[in-house]
Image (cartoon, rainbow, N blue to C red):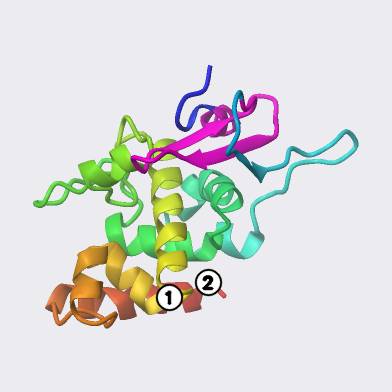
């Protein structure tokens, strides 16, 4: 059965690896499966073949300076592999967003490690924003799409992650003049550089 996140959540649960295919429906829902039943799917993640082991988390990332980083290193590495977003960047965002607290809830309603808003969670098939695996994967896929939308400009993608895509566009594809966002972007960049 094809369900959002089902194939990758299987990976997070340490079950057998399989090729994972992805497509985005017209309504923006991301669909992942290991057995595409129709057209429009692209290969997202190829499973290791016999004789090859799955990649281990990078020592530099799993050795991140935050005390809780090691606890989430494996799931972050898997989300990085699935999304194509650097694991160090995911660590940097998580550190700034929730300080690695999977139960974090902001006054505005953002939840979990990557502080997903309800609409963003729905967009990426996240049914439980407090489930660390779903949350990190959903946030990684969102960050991937923001990087693509803003032509790889990391500062703009981070500003959009914090303030919303519309806010960045409203200000002519510049970092919006919001105090929170202007503090957030340098903080994430500092976290990211410290892991490189």
Q: Where 113 falls versus 13 (above or below)?
A: below
Q: Where 51 falls versus 95 (above or below)?
A: above
Residue 112 found in image quarter: top left
Q: Where 104 falls versus 122 (above or below)?
A: below
Q: Which mark is residue 154?
A: 1
What is the x, y in percent for residue 54?
74, 42
Q: Where 51 falls versus 60 (above or below)?
A: above
Residue that sits furthest to the top in the current view: 1
Q: Is residue 191 visible?
A: yes
What is the x, y in percent for residue 62?
57, 57
Q: Nearer the viewer, residue 60 or 174?
A: 174
What is the x, y in percent for residue 102?
32, 43
- Label 2's element? loop
Residue at (10, 52) in percent of width and height = 108
Residue at (53, 60) in percent of width and height = 85
Foreground label between 1 and 2:
1
Q: Nearer the viewer, residue 53 or 174?
A: 174
Task: Residue 14: say if magenta.
Answer: yes
Q: Which mark is residue 182?
A: none
Residue at (36, 43) in percent of width and height = 28
Viewed as shown, does residue 51 lie left or right of 23?
right
Crowding at mark 2 (Cα within 10 Å: few <14, some 14-19, many 20+): some
The residue stretch that appears in magenta: 7-36
Viewed as shown, does residue 134 lie left or right of 23?
left
Task: Residue 154: say if magenta.
Answer: no
The residues bearing labels 1 and 2 have C-alpha atoms spaced at a distance of 16 Å
Viewed as shown, does residue 77 lie left or right of 45?
left
Counting residues from the N terminus, which is met first, the one under dot 1 or under dot 2?
1
What is the x, y in percent for residue 100?
36, 52
Q: Residue under circle 2? A: 195
């Amino acid at each position: 059965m094809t369900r959002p996140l089902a194939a990758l959540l299987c990976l997070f649960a340490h079950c057998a690896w399989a090729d994972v295919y992805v497509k985005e429906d017209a309504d923006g829902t991301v669909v992942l499966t290991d057995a595409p039943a129709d057209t429009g799917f692209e290969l997202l993640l190829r499973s290791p073949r016999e004789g090859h082991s799955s990649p281990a988390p990078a020592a530099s990332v799993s050795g991140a300076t935050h005390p809780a980083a090691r606890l989430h290193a494996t799931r972050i590495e898997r989300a990085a592999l699935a999304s194509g977003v650097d694991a160090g960047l995911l660590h940097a965002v998580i550190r700034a967003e929730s300080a690695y607290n999977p139960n974090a809830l902001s006054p505005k309603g953002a939840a979990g490690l990557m502080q997903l808003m309800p609409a963003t969670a729905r967009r990426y098939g996240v049914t439980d924003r407090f489930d660390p695996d779903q949350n990190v994967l959903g946030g990684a896929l969102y960050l991937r799409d923001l990087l693509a939308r803003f032509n790889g400009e990391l500062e703009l993608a981070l500003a959009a992650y914090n303030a919303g895509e519309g806010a960045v566009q409203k200000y002519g594809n510049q970092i919006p003049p919001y105090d929170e966002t202007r503090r957030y972007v340098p903080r994430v960049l500092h976290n990211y550089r410290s892991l490189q």
